[in-house]
Amino acid sequence: MAYVQIESDNRMEEGPEGLQFQSFLSTDARAASPVGNVGSNASRGYRTDNGGPRSSAFWTLEYYQPYFDIDTKTVLRRCYTTLLPTSSSYLSAHLTPGADLYGPFWTLTTLIFALFICSSLASSIAAYLSSGGAVPGTPEIEYDFGLLSTAVAIVYAYGLGVPVLLWLALRYMGVGEWSVVEALSVWGYGQFVWIPVALLCVIPVPLVRWILVGIAFLVSGYFLAANVYPILSTADAKPVRLIIILLGVLHAGLALCFKILFFSYYVVKPEGPSDPLPESLRL
């Protein structure tokens, strides 16, 4: 058996400083390799800006983390733009690069506390005006904390339940133009107008309250119709478009619930024009 002596590389004897590593992959291959992007969102399974697939399962927190990765400035912009009627779609014009769940969640949650706090404040103002502003002998005001649970049930059922049910119904009928996250985002941001209206409904003038509720109903209703009807119109079956009527009825019911349950406090001596609401519906 013959042995061949191979001359050692002088660079191996120079120590670690003499070692050099070189990648034989092309630039495109290194960019696509997970090793070359250890610190990127894509390597951790998060959603990238181009909407690429995520490797995380839907029951893990990493799956939902991209939908909450949004800054406050963007959330505020998405909120107040719902008050401005435009001809373009809200999804394409404002929910880019993608819809989020952070803004809709806090919009609905803020609305719940706004309804309860402003309703309690309206109740105390009505009681104060009913007593003529006299502190002695004024009955103690008892806050109805049951209104808080009522607000939670109504707001979350409408802001979360309705879009999910609508998305499931459209998927069943073969209309898949939007995702469930986009549906929740549109519905959540669409309820933003009720927050300033809840603050203004503290004014103890029944007619003013009705006008404010009517304005909020029209603004939010137009916003939802302008973003939902184009999706319904893509269905092959024309009767699918009639769903917009059902959504309008539900939206009108929401507006009446807000007015009757949270802002129907009256003073003994009415302030301003009389309320058109029948006596039997007044609190």
Image: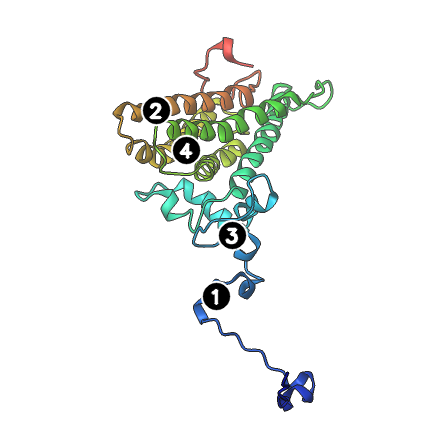
Between marks 1 and 3, how big is the CA–CA gap? 32 Å
Q: Which residue is mark 4?
A: 220
Q: Residue furthest front?
A: 1
Q: Are marks 1 and 4 in contact (CB under 8 Å)?
A: no
Nearer to the camera, 85 or 52: 52
- Tag 4: amino acid: Ser
Tell me which numbered mark, 1 or 2, is placed earlier along the sequence: 1
Which quadrant, please, contains the N terminus?
bottom right
User: Of discs 4 and 2, which sits in the foreground?
Assistant: 2
Q: In the rendering, at what x and y percent does residue 183 appear?
A: 44, 36
* Label located before the other in sequence (4 or 3): 3
Name which of mark 1 and mark 3 comes first in the sequence: 1
Amino acid tagged 1: Ala
Which residue position is annotated with label 2?
A: 243
User: Could you tell me which secondary element the residue under label 4 belongs to?
Assistant: helix
Comes first in the chain, label 1 or label 4: 1
Disc 4: CA contacts within 10 A as few (<14), some (14-19) or many (>=20): many
Q: Tell me which residue sits at (38%, 27%) in the image.
A: 172
The amino acid on which the numbered mark 2 sits, given as a three-letter code, is Ile
- Which quadrant would residue 175 be assigned to in this image? top left
For disc 1, the marked residue is 31
Q: Which part of the image, by quadrant, shows the C terminus?
A: top right
Tell me the tag on residue 263: none
The residue shown at (52%, 42%) is 103
Near mark 3 (Cα within 10 A), the count class, few <14, some 14-19 or many ≥20, is few
Determine which residue is flagged by label 3.
Answer: 73
Marked residue nearer the N-terminal end (4 or 2): 4
Using the numbered discs, state the Cα–Cα distance from disc 2 to disc 3 in whole angstroms: 34 Å
**Residue 228 percent coordinates (x, y):** 36, 33
User: Quick one: SS at disc 1?
Assistant: helix
